[in-house]
Image (cartoon, helix red, strand yellow):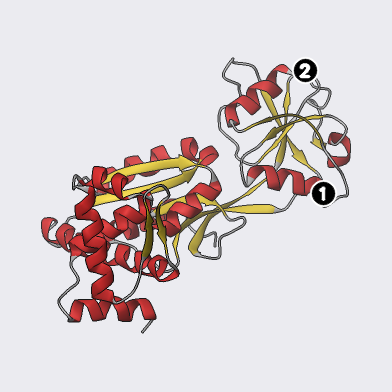
Amino acid sequence: MSTTDFLVDAGVARGELTFRQLSHFVAAAEDGTISGAAKRLRFSPSAISASITELERALGAELCVRRRAQGVTLTSTGSLVLAKAKRVLADVAELSYLVRGDGAELVGPLVVGCFVTLAASLLPRLLDEFEQLHPGVTIDFVVGAQDELQRELISGAIDVAILYDMGGMEPLTRFELYEARGYALFGERHPFADREVVTLEELAPMPLILFDQTPSSQYATSMFEARGLTPMVRHRTDAFELTRSIVARSDTAYAVLVQRPDNKQSYEGLPIIEKEIRPAPPGVSVVFAWARDVELSPRARALADLVRKQYPIPS
C-alpha cells in the first residue's frame, strides 16, 4: 500500500474524512486559490479553508500552504493526496452513473481530447457513431496542443485523447490508430508542383512556412536536422489552415505537414499540392491515450472499443 493510500484509508477508518473535504481540497488545488474554489463550488472561502484543515487533521499531514497573496501551494504529500482524492471522487461518481444507467445503459460524462490538426478529420465520425450507440453519455471534447492534452490527461481534466505518439508519452497508456508520415505542401505555381517527389536538400534553401505546434514543428525540423540541414523558416504560425493558405498563395514557399485533409484547397479555394519526400521520413503514430494510473470508466472503455473497431490493426 502506498503512503497516500495509507493516509486516505486511515482517515476513512477513523471516520473523520468526508467526500466534501476531498471535493473542497481538489477544487482549491485545481484553482490555486481558496476564493476560486469557493466561487466554483458556491461555498464561502472560510468553509473551503475549514474543510481543508479538517482533511489535514484527519490524514495527519500538511497538504498545502495557504498564503493570502499567493494562493494555495501543494506540499509533496498534498500532490500525492490530490491524485488519490480525484480517483476516490471519480469512483463515487461512477456509482451514481451505474445506478442511473441500471447497469445496462451507459450514462454520464465523457471528456475527449484531440490534437488540433486531427480533430476535424477524426472527431465528427467518432462522435456521431458513439452518440448513436450510447445516447445517455454526455460527450465534451477539448481540442488543443499536444502538451496541453498530455497534462490534462494526467491531471484527470480529460478522460481520453487522440494525439501523436511523440514526446512525454511515458505516463500514458495508448494504442495506435494508424501511422502518418510527413510530406511537402506547395501552391500550384511553385516550381516543384509538377514534381513526383522532392528531397529535403532541395527544400532547405526555400522559404518554409512552419506550422509551429508541438509536436508537429519538432517533427518537421528534426527531419532536416537528421540530414544535417537547416531549413529557412520564413513564417511561423500555430494555425494549420493558415499554414496551408499561405503556401497556396506562394510560388516559392512550402510547408512540411503530417495530417492530410481530404480537402486539397485552401480556405480561399486555391489548389494545394502534396508531394512525397524522399528518402521517406520516419512515420509517427496517431494514438488513443489515457493516463497510465487510471482505470477507464465504462464510457471511456466503450469509446476505446469503437476506436479499435474504426481503426483495426492491419493483419
Label 1 to label 2, Cα distance in Å?
Answer: 28 Å
- Return the x and y of residue 246 as percentages of the image width and height: 68, 21
Residue 110 is situated, as x and y percent measured from the top left of the image, at 30, 50
Image position, residue 260 (x, y; %): 60, 37
> How far from the left and from the top, in percent, is residue 8?
28, 75
Going by the image, does 51 lie left or right of 65?
left
The quarter of the displayed image where residue 258 is located? top right
State whether residue 205 appears in this view. yes
Point 11% across, 61% down: residue: 99
In which image quadrant can residue 303 be found? bottom left
Quadrant where the C terminus is found in the figure = bottom right
- Amino acid, disc 1: Glu
Q: Is residue 94 visible?
A: no
Q: Which mark is residue 119?
A: none
In the picture shown, does residue 81 fall above or below 218?
below
Give the residue displayed 36% in from the left and 84% down from the top: 1
- Residue in the foreground of this view, choosing between 26 and 130: 26
The residue at which mark 2 appears reads as 189
- Disc 2 is placed on an element classified as loop
Q: How many C-alpha atoms fall within 10 Å of the one at disc 2: few (<14), some, or many (≥20)?
A: some
Q: Secondary structure at mark 1?
A: helix
Query: Crowding at label 1, few (<14), some or many (≥20) Cα neighbours within 10 Å?
Result: few
Q: Nearer the viewer, residue 47 or 300?
A: 47
Q: Camera-side residue: 285 or 53?
A: 53
Mark 1 vs 2, N-terminal side = 2
Q: Amino acid at mark 2?
A: Arg
Q: Nearer the viewer, mark 1 or mark 2?
A: 1
Disc count in the image? 2
Q: Which residue is mark 1?
A: 225
Whether 30 is drawn above or below 235: the answer is below
Q: Quadrant of residue 141?
A: top left
